Amino acid sequence: MRDPGRKSLAQLENLCKQLYETTDTTTRLQAEKALVEFTNSPDCLSKCQLLLERGSFMSSKTTVLNYDSLLACQMPKPGTHDSSFYLMLFFNQDSVEYCIIGVTILSQLTNEINQADTTHPLTKHRKIASSFRDSSLFDIFTLSCNLLKQASGKNLNLNDESQHGLLMQLLKLTHNCLNFDFIGTSTDESSDDLCTVQIPTSWRSAFLDSSTLQLFFDLYHSIPPSFSPLVLSCLVQIASVRRSLFNNAERAKFLSHLVDGVKRILENPQSLSDPNNYHEFCRLLARLKSNYQLGELVKVENYPEVIRLIANFTVTSLQHWEFAPNSVHYLLSLWQRLAASVPYVKATEPHMLETYTPEVTKAYITSRLESVHIILRDGLEDPLEDTGLVQQQLDQLSTIGRCEYEKTCALLVQLFDQSAQSYQELLQSASASPMDIAVQEGRLTWLVYIIGAVIGGRVSFASTDEQDAMDGELVCRVLQLMNLTDSRLAQAGNEKLELAMLSFFEQFRKIYIGDQVQKSSKLYRRLSEVLGLNDETMVLSVFIGKIITNLKYWGRCEPITSKTLQLLNDLSIGYPFLSYSVRKLVKLSAVQFMLNNHTSEHFSFLGINNQSNLTDMRCRTTFYTALGRLLMVDLGEDEDQYEQFMLPLTAAFEAVAQMFSTNSFNEQEAKRTLVGLVRDLRGIAFAFNAKTSFMMLFEWIYPSYMPILQRAIELWYHDPACTTPVLKLMAELVHNRSQRLQFDVSSPNGILLFRETSKMITMYGNRILTLGEVPKDQVYALKLKGISICFSMLKAALSGSYVNFGVFRLYGDDALDNALQTFIKLLLSIPHSDLLDYPKLSQSYYSLLEVLTQDHMNFIASLEPRVIMYILSSISEGLTALDTMVCTGCCSCLDHIVTYLFKQLSRSTKKRTTPLNQESDRFLHIMQQHPEMIQQMLSTVLNIIIFEDCRNQWSMSRPLLGLILLNEKYFSDLRNSIVNSQPPEKQQAMHLCFENLMEGIERNLLTKNRDRFTQNLSAFRREVNDSMKNSTYGVNSNDMMS
């Protein structure tokens, strides 16, 4: 009789063969389903062992299919070592193939445990990852390094596919170990240059041993370039280990070995011709300064030679601008940090940056200028098109260029004069070719950008009069060039050069315009001598002149228009703390011209053009925000001046009203006129932060023009290009910013304004819900964005403190009820996942919910059970959100709900003549029917406080006391579970921590009692963390997060 076990193993092997080799889709799917079931079976591990013993390589592949998920389930459980035992079976085989499988499993396991997934709460993921880190990760890293040492000690035959695969998998495994998120910070690639690897203290021995670092440098030099990027990636992580892992002497020794390894690579740079190697090596160089101080680097024995080699490497890299352009960021980052450290370095050893930094600056500037002709000639992609990348590099150059600034300035003056003279000669020549003109314009574009950057790099405490005079030389040249290019705008203009000018003006404004600038600055003296600009007022007139010129000639160029208006907006900032600069600005005739003539006749971007898209009108809001601020400087209570300013907008409203009054009208024209108008008004409303001016605006728009906005929502609710600007205007009007919405005691305007708000929310909400099914990729634009604005609008109105909401029910007014019921309808139309997937929706929803639970808890209590459970579920999910604002808002909501429950429960147990109202009674009943929701949130909050990097501990503490008092038995069970999960010798300490947590706490939620609990909780968290240190045990995640 055959062994049934062997029969099942044969079936497993057959299923694997079907999965790997069959071309029939149905057969493959059936095999995959059966193997997934196998991974979930209790005897999976033992069968894996038998499969390995059979020796079939196809059997071994079975383990790769299921081992990841199996180990991910088992490894985190305290005290489980079976999985590690079975895993070692791979390394006890004589075959390289088995070893590859073992390494691959470890690599994938490490990677998967490091990544949070959507199937588990974040807190549970961190619990699993922490347990894996403490129990297994260092052993895996040590195993990987040992295997790499064995491999490097042998003459590997990398033509052998199996040995090639083993080395690749070992490097991936090592990198995954070093790339592990050790403390749950979830760093992303955007913060790459700031990343510190938080290696646990228990790993110290591996990094104090110089052979670990040397291993990877030796591997780099001994293996083919195709492997080198992974080796360098490991070195990048090793170079980034936290400083506190070493004492000063150990750190100096580690840094010395690291610098020696870098020097060896620079002396043998052949492999760096590979773009991937080059990129990783640039990252490694950047980490030298991000993780170590200049004072430490200069003390390294070979520092003079190394800094020379790095400088030469950087200069060569910059000169070859077309090779790996995305890697330049890391080299510039290194030199930026080095240059920024010069004023603070106290070491006696020379840093030599005064020698090499000017070389780097010169290489960057000259290489950008030389690239212009080649790019135009060969039709290559122009780096200037990527304004984000250019700005990032300029920010770095601003610091590098200020080091030995005299040399930088002399170079820029020389290059600028050459290009400007050539450009002027070409413009005067009748036979000049367009290519030659384009080359000079491209060179001047780079120079204007760079001049703006180095001026923006001025640091007040480190600047001298001589440097300010040098800035004056550069500014004079750019302004002279501007006069030349502006004089030609009627014939031709260069968009990139204009954008560079605006970047220059922005930097100049930040450094030399404002009350904090000494007007005796040598820069102003130079401007007076060369250009006749004797004071700041005359300089401001140049700014405004440029702004008006751009708006006149570049009104149809969105990038230039938006940046020009942003410059105007930045200049206008200063109200209500009126600076002298803003007062000077308002007195300029050009500014008065704008305040009196803001029409499409003078500013083409304000026109209603049939070819323009509705979304292209966003810049109008910025324009009117700036005009609104400037108008307020001298407006006071002058209603005539206000009405004069509003004439163009009044005419636009009247035009829309006229269209709406007819049965047939040009819908596109009406949309364009209205959208432009409401964008203008939103800018004005945002700027009017004072009561007097805002009341003028309110009385102008209400009641005359509010029906037009309501009508627009009614007609075009399905078109977000129309509804979004209207809803945003309404949200701005009801926002009581700076207490501007203060109505007289005899005025009903607060109530009337809320009625209009309620009417708009109700109309939009009821209509948007008729859209039906919306495709997932369009749901935010078509539906959720408008709903989010409605939530923000309702929150602003409810928390504005200008309406007594009790009067609505008292006088039978249904405005409040309509708004709140519409909110519930909209909320129930949104899946829970969407509430957290869209950040703006999250913030608007949880902010509104916070106001409702604080001031309108009777309304929440009156809702149907399913709605209450939906809201509580959304709070529960929000507690673990990555957005701290959302998490804090959820804590506040939960605190209000728990406090309400506790008060009602306390009242229900007392002998009172007044019984509980119906809503409170029903709410209590619902909570008693579903205690698991509140208990789950108690577990979540406690788990976050004990085990997570809790960034809002105070907020978490506020609802926790109420949760404990409402669930005392559950809290007692939870406490016992946590205590019992600790090692026997630590149980008493953990029990004492919980005793101290509740010491002196009374059974009430009075402020004094809450504050004492918050203090106890801070001590509790410290004591628990101390108690759990060096413990491989933890709280059973099933108890905590079930």
Image (cartoon, rainbow, N blue to C red):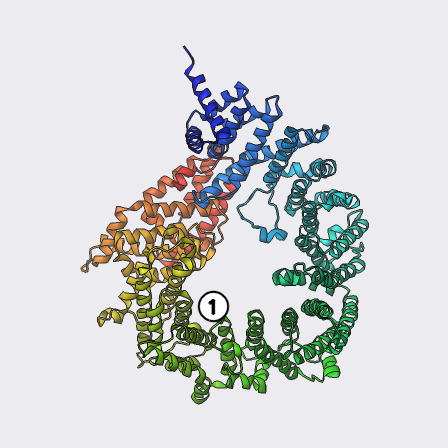
Position of 678 with respect to 319 (left or right) is left
Q: Nearer the viewer, residue 922 or 22?
A: 22
Position of 669 with respect to 493 (left or right) is left
Instruction: Tell me if residue 906 comes above or below residue 31 in the rendering.
Output: below
Q: Residue furthest top?
A: 1
Q: Residue furthest front?
A: 431
Question: Which residue appears at 52% of the width and 76% of the height?
Answer: 605
- For numbered disc 1, what is the local secondary structure? helix
Residue 390 x %, y %: 65, 62
Q: Nearer the viewer, residue 468 or 415?
A: 415
Q: Nearer the viewer, residue 539 or 436?
A: 436
Q: Which quarter of the image is occupied by the N terminus?
A: top left
Instruction: Tell me if residue 582 comes above or below residue 284 in the rendering.
Output: below
Residue 970 x %, y %: 34, 42
Identity, as a three-letter code, of the amino acid under mark 1: Thr
Q: Nearer the viewer, residue 287 or 208?
A: 287
**Residue wearing tag 1:** 615
Q: Is residue 271 visible?
A: yes
Q: Quadrant of residue 583?
A: bottom right
Mark 1 Cα-neighbour bin, 10 Å: few <14, some 14–19, many ≥20: some
Instruction: Tell me if residue 441 comes above or below residue 952 in the rendering.
Output: below
Residue 181 x %, y %: 55, 44
Q: Quadrant of residue 357?
A: bottom right
Q: Which quarter of the image is occupied by the C terminus?
A: top left
Residue 166 x %, y %: 63, 31
Q: Residue furthest bottom?
A: 640
Q: Quadrant of residue 419?
A: bottom right
